[in-house]
Image (spheres, grey):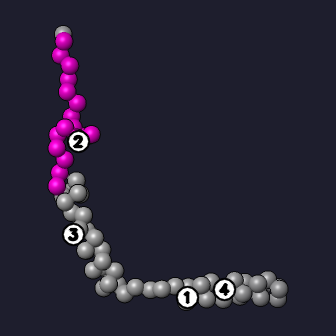
Amino acid sequence: MSGASSVGTIKEVVQQLRLEAGLNRVKVSQAAADLKQCCMRNAQHDPLLTGLSSSTNPFRPQKVCSFL
């Protein structure tokens, strides 16, 4: 590697590290508590938990037309 390209690479790495060092971080325990609270708050609207009525279910079996 030439000297100019290695200096450029090192500058990019330093810039990326500075960017990452400036990020606000949240503790995993706090993020998990927030996620749990969000899930509990929206549980009554979750069709996987409450189910769908047969009239609004887009995946219900199609009715067969028997004219014959």
Q: CA distance from mark 2 to mark 1?
A: 47 Å
Which of the two discs, 2 and 1, labels the residue nearer the N terminus?
A: 1
Q: Position of residue 59 (x, y in %)?
A: 25, 40
Q: CA distance from mark 4 to mark 3?
A: 40 Å
Residue plotted at (20% across, 27% down): 63
Residue type at the position of mark 2: Asn
Residue 63 is one of the magenta-drawn residues: yes
Residue that mark 4 sits on: 15
Residue that mark 3 sits on: 40
Q: CA distance from mark 1 to mark 3?
A: 32 Å
Residue that mark 1 sits on: 22
Q: Secondary structure at mark 3?
A: helix
* In this rendering, position of residue 19 left or right of residue 12: left
Q: Overall secondary structure of the magenta stretch? A: loop
Marks 4, 3: nearer the viewer = 3
Is 5 rendered above or below residue 58? below
Using the image as rendered, state which of residue 31 and residue 8 is in the foreground. Answer: 31
Which of the two discs, 4 and 3, labels the residue nearer the N terminus?
A: 4
Q: CA distance from mark 2 to mark 3?
A: 23 Å
Mark 2 crowdedness (10 Å alpha carbons): few <14, some 14-19, many ≥20: few
Residue plotted at (48% across, 86% down): 24
Mark sitting on residue 42: none
Which of the two discs, 1 and 3, labels the residue nearer the N terminus?
A: 1
The segment highlighted magenta reads 50-67
